[in-house]
Image: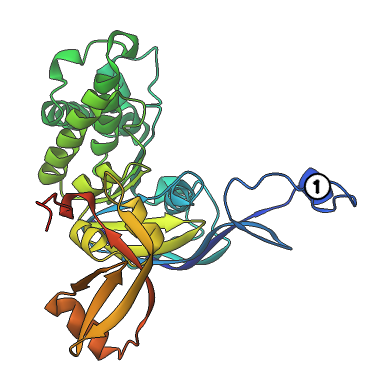
Amino acid sequence: MASVTLKNVKKIYPFNGDDAKKKKKKKGEEAPEKKVNLQITDKGVVAVQEFSLDIKDKEFIVLVGPSGCGKSTTLRMIAGLEEISEGELYIGDRLVNDVAPKDRDIAMVFQNYALYPHMTVYENMAFALKLRHAPKDEIDKKVKEAAEILDITQYLGRKPKALSGGQRQRVAIGRAIVRDPQVMLMDEPLSNLDAKLRNQMRAEIIKLRERINTTFIYVTHDQTEAMTLGDRIVIMKDGFIQQIGTPQEVFNHPYNLFVATFIGTPQMNMFENAKLVKVDGKYAVQLDNQTVVLSDEKQAKLAANNVAEQDVVLGVRPEHIELTAGG
């Protein structure tokens, strides 16, 4: 098992010939609609910027954010499927920027299962070990152990087409864990499943994590998944890390407006016409004709930073709103 460290990692996708022509648009031409606010430089499109993260041995880290934020690109750089443009990546104490994916001692589970349709479940799970020329009895032992952990022993003789979506995803996970990887990478593994199966598989992944001692790095766009699974969550937007913290930290102490509105269902209510004021020497928030004195914890933080009275955005989570009798 191993820690994973990323130091100022950056990913730039260089322009191809067509992109360069599009950049030099003629006068009067409209610019194409921007899907995301990624930075464009002379070298190309910057998909991931200044990504620094220390992942502890056996920690479960979740990268979460909207489509196009750079989370899957980051995972693919860790896997070795994408080159790192700048920065350093360590697995344990080893710098692996130029190490081939097969030599990184990682396993990856994808969104689309990627099972061999002509092989049985047993053969799919054993395939990577056969490529390593592992002894037959070792292969048999590891496949059966993984099948028992994932509750798919009864399906070992079946082909993938005879399995449900949830069963196929279990096989894909089993194929990864038989290798005893130092790091397990999971790229939106539940997004093809319906809501009921997703809930069930989330519980299975939590059980799996308790039974195998390895480091997990999990990518999802679903903040509920992130909050349920992660020891810590890395929230991304436009290639940048917005906040790193435990589920409780990012929920209760969001670092910025994006994190505040992204984490939580239903979304946090935002009031932009609020003011931070002082009442009898204490900090309070004023909204229209209502004034609310802040908690002792917030008082201490604001006082420590000597924050002045100013316009603020007030965020209130729906579960903190109560209807009371008038007057």
- Pointer 1 local density, CA inside 10 Å: few below 14, some 14–19, many at least 20: few
| Image point (18%, 59%), residue name | 248
Residue located at (42% from left, 56% from top): 236
Residue 41 lies left or right of residue 54; in this view the side is: right
The amino acid marked with disc number 1 is Lys
Q: In the displayed structure, does residue 316 sit left or right of residue 296?
A: right
- Residue at the (27%, 32%) spot, across then down: 173
At mark 1, the secondary structure is helix
Asked whether the viewer can see residue 212, the reply is: yes
Q: Residue lying farthest front?
A: 327
Its colouring scheme is: rainbow
Q: Is residue 231 above or below residue 127?
A: below
Residue 209 figure quarter: top left
Task: Give me the residue at 21% from left, 16% from top.
Answer: 156
Q: Compared with residue 151, is residue 25 higher up or lower down, i.e. above or below?
A: below
**Which quarter shows the N terminus?**
bottom left
Residue 90 visible to an observer of this rendering: no
Q: Quadrant of the C terminus?
A: bottom left
Q: How many marks?
A: 1
> Which sits in the foreground, 123 or 28?
28
Estimate the x, y position of residue 223 in percent, counting from the top left: 30, 46
The residue wearing badge 1 is: 22
Residue 77, position in %: x, y?
47, 53
Residue sitting nearer the eye, 93 or 319: 319
Q: Position of residue 176 (x, y in %)?
A: 29, 36
Q: Is residue 267 left or right of residue 82?
A: left
Return the x and y of residue 154 as percentages of the image width and height: 14, 14
Above-or-below relation of 74 to 299: above
